[in-house]
Amino acid sequence: MANEKIPYKIYLEESEMPKAWYNLRADMKNKPAPLLNPATHQPMKAEELAPVFCEELIKQELDNDTKFFPIPEEIRNFYKMYRPSPLVRAYCLEEKLGTPAKIYYKFEGNNTSGSHKLNSAIAQAYYAKKQGLKGVTTETGAGQWGTALSMACAYFDLDCKVYMVKVSYEQKPFRREVMRTYGASVTPSPSMDTQVGRKILAEHPGTTGSLGCAISEAVEVATSSEGYRYVLGSVLNQVLLHQSVIGLETKAALDKYGIKPDIIIGCAGGGSNLGGLIAPFMGEKLRGEADYRIVAVEPASCPSLTRGKYAYDFCDTGMVCPLAKMYTLGSGFIPAPNHAGGLRYHGMSSTLSQLYDDGLMEATSVPQTAVFEAAEYFARAEGILPAPESSHAIKVAMDEAIKCKETGEEKTIVFGLTGTGYFDMVAYEKFHDGKMDDYIPTDEEIAANFAKLPKVD
């Protein structure tokens, strides 16, 4: 190791930070299916989305052809507070595993929000402010997105209303307090504050909630409040576009030292981190310039890619949002209250779903006790306490490195370390106390929700 010229951390200069977001859809031969109006089943038009989303974000959402979108100077100036983020060679983890594999991770936890979510939050807040809005509404699972958006809204002096999945609201009180510190109001979802929340509670008494529930509430409040729009931290094309800064920086850092990864691994809930990390690599793959093995890792308790159906479905439990064609477990699926709150979404990004359906990437699911075992192993080796979401990628990266040990192959593995786990100590406590279980939905439970999918010709 001492003779290698690769540093422990690869930093890019500020001047090397991306000046434009990369739109992966522009290189896709098979474009992701359009959002549909749930009433007419016709593709959504910009004017139909205008009551929900910011105008500029709608343009980004619907544009499948523009390859690069310049990053506004105001957003780039904000990015400079924590970007470029480091690409780290996991020398200590490699040594502990005894593997010939070279392991790198892109660390996105070096900002107050503790995760990659700030990359899109600041962009969406910027466009809301530019449009002259009073504020925005959103949902959050584990709280990283809500935290990031509250920071971004504080920066641009916007009101921020967050609907937080109830189980996470209870499990992660400190994450909630960070949001309130930045001026956001935080409501556990489903709540009695909205019509859709009351309906969900009537149908599912005592439910711990889901991202689908929280989305429904946030959209209802946005569309019924003058001067507000709804913003989303994952799933949508616009979010994957903003998160492409992760992959663009990762590729630039690797190229700086002539490193070509064999395997790229990311956790997958709605698709924001994974879509951002793989964007430029997948672009090369689509253009026939290079090949990579790309692996999405999801929780076994919410396995949309590995056990879901590729079909049009509502993006939310309350069925008030447009229909998206995606790998889905059904909008009525309420996942078990596991501790990777950011991955508890019933569907997957339409862009990633199309790529997966085309065989351009793989997917696997892992149970949460194995995830926390990997998280603890990584923390003891590398000194960073990882978020439960990120630890799904860690688990599979370690598995791949162990395979290299068994075969003697010297593969280069890159994974996304999406954030830190310092607000997830209740989860770590349950793991250490042996109180964590590995609930996995049955085929019958999943099939029951498939039966309720909307009928789209």
Image (spheres, helix red, strand yellow):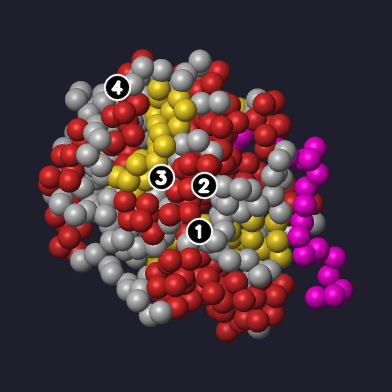
Local crowd at mark 4 within 10 Å, few (<14), some, or many (≥20)?
A: few
Q: Amino acid at mark 3?
A: Thr
Image quarter (top left, top right, bottom left or bottom right) of the C terminus: top left
Q: Is 104 left or right of 448, judged from the image as shown?
A: right
Report the magenta residues as a range: 1-26
- Locate residue 183, reporting x and y percent: 50, 35
Q: CA distance from mark 4 to mark 3?
A: 20 Å
Residue highlighted by disc 4: 224
Of label 3 and label 1, which has the lower sequence position? 3
The secondary structure type at the circle numbered 3 is strand
Q: Residues within 10 Å of mark 2 (few under 14, many from 20)?
A: many
Q: Is residue 33 magenta?
A: no
The residue to which callout 3 is attached is: 140
How far apart are labels 4 and 2 at the CA level?
27 Å
Secondary structure of the residue carrying numbered label 4 = loop
Residue occupied by mark 2: 178
SS for dot 1: loop
Q: Nearer the viewer, residue 397 or 93?
A: 93
Q: Amino acid at mark 4?
A: Ser
Please report the residue visible at 48 percent of the width from the left and 66 percent of the height from the top. Answer: 425
Specify whether residue 157 is in view. yes
Task: Between label 1 and label 2, give the one nearer the viewer.
Answer: 2
The amino acid beneath tag 2 is: Val
Mark 1 to mark 2: distance in Å?
10 Å
